[in-house]
Structures are given as C-alpha cells and as structure tokens.
Amino acid sequence: MTATSLTTAQDLAVVIPSPPRGDVVDLRVERLHVTVESVLVGSDADAAWETYRTSLEPLAGVAAMKQTLAESELRAVVADPRIKKYVGRDEHGTVVAVLTLTTELSTENISSRFYRERYPEHYAAGRLHYLGFLVVRPDAQARGLIMLLVARVTGDLEHEGGVVAFDVCGYNDETFAFARLCRLVSSRTRPTDLVTLDVQTYYAMEVPPRV
C-alpha cells in the first residue's frame, strides 16, 4: 500500500530486528480491541466484506491499479486459514477492521521468487510475511484503530524479528502515510528499517487524431 504520487506504486518491506524480551504494547483504545483469527465466517465474514467495501470505495477513482477484490475473492481470503487475520472489533464485538498477514506468499498477487531471493534466510525460517490489506470502516478510522492493528502486528513479530512486505497506492500513502506509520509504531521499541523494493509507474501516451 505506498508511493510518492498517485501514478506510482511501491512494494515496501519493514525489517523488524530480533528484540530484547519483555516489551508490552498497550492495545486499549476506546473499548476497541484486536483479535487474531485464522478464519472469519457467518456474520463476521459479512461484516468483513462491508468493512472492506466501504473502506476501499474511495480508491476507485484515484488509483491506477485496481485496489479491491470482488466479494467472492474477499470471502475466500477471510476463509483461508493460511492467511492470518488481525480483526478490529468495536465495543459490541462487530468487525470494523481487518488486517491480513501471511507467510504463504502464493496466496498473494506477487512474485514469490522476488521475495524469496531478496530475503532467503527469512523465507527459510518462516519469518517473511506479506501484509495483504488493512481496512478500517470509515466511522472507526478516527479512533486510533489503524495504529492499534499495526502495533499488534509489530508487537507479535518483534519477538522473532522478521520482514513484513506490503504494497501501497500513492493515494493511501499521501492520505494515511501508512508505510511511515508502520515504521513509527515499530520503532517505538527498537530501530526498524523501511526500504523500497520496487516502483511501478503508470503512463498514458495520448495520440491525437490525424487532421
């Protein structure tokens, strides 16, 4: 999810070093809480789809690459146990945010070979993770839930050290500064590197009609 303009997409990776033990992340934010789940079904899957749809709807006209999955694709993701779900819930237990994370790179629309060759040791040790998406329902975005989710992920991974790779469109980077937010939250407990792995630029060549 990050870039420097609306016409650029970047893949990034946050490298989280192996830590000292005993660090605790405070996850209390206005009665919102985060659970880590392997599958979402029934009403939770319905709420995940509604959260996904309403969260990403504004990207339809501002990002060159298609940013959304179809409903059937989203439901397949939340039902796939190979993909870990960090689920934000409100005070009623309703799903209002979802972050997906996986070490099974074949589940993502990326070049697995690129990441395996870039981080061979992390891949072999099962410490190379891909963040598929982070969505927060609009009415919950101002309540600190994005930071809550990122803090939970980095808090879980800091005990092993690892790499979290992800891609961000330019609009999200400029609006939410997601990549910089990840580095900021992770760096609260130890230095964390944020590196750009690749950049893709969308061009248009307009050919005027012959007169």
Image (cartoon, rainbow, N blue to C red):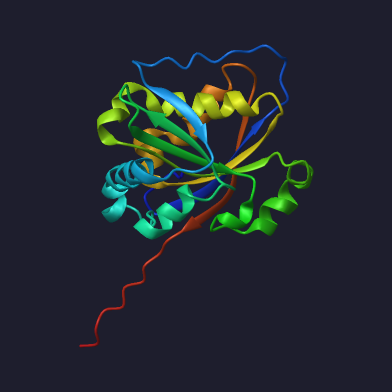
Q: Quadrant of the C terminus?
A: bottom left
In the image, taking residue 198 as reference, residue 170 lies left or right, namely left
Q: Nearer the viewer, residue 204 or 170?
A: 170
Compared to residue 41, the image places residue 181 above or below, namely above
Residue found at x 48% / y 50%: 79
In the image, farthest residue toward the bottom = 211
Residue 13 lies, in percent from the top left, at 60, 40
Residue found at x 46% / y 47%: 78
Residue 165 lies, in percent from the top left, at 59, 43
In the image, farthest residue toward the front = 42
Compared to residue 209, the image places residue 202 above or below, namely above
Residue found at x 53% / y 53%: 199
Q: Nearer the viewer, residue 84 or 201?
A: 84
Q: Nearer the viewer, residue 197 or 102?
A: 102
In the image, farthest residue toward the left = 211
In the image, taking residue 203 as reference, residue 153 lies left or right, namely right
Compared to residue 69, the image places residue 37 above or below, namely above
**Is residue 64 in sight in this rendering?**
no
In the image, taking residue 130 as reference, residue 66 lies left or right, namely left
In the image, taking residue 196 as reference, residue 94 lies left or right, namely left
- Quarter of the rendering containing residue 112: bottom right
Tally of marks: 0
**Is residue 151 in sight in this rendering?**
yes
- Quarter of the rendering containing residue 136: top left
Residue 64 lies, in percent from the top left, at 36, 58
Residue 65 lies, in percent from the top left, at 40, 59
Residue found at x 70% / y 27%: 17
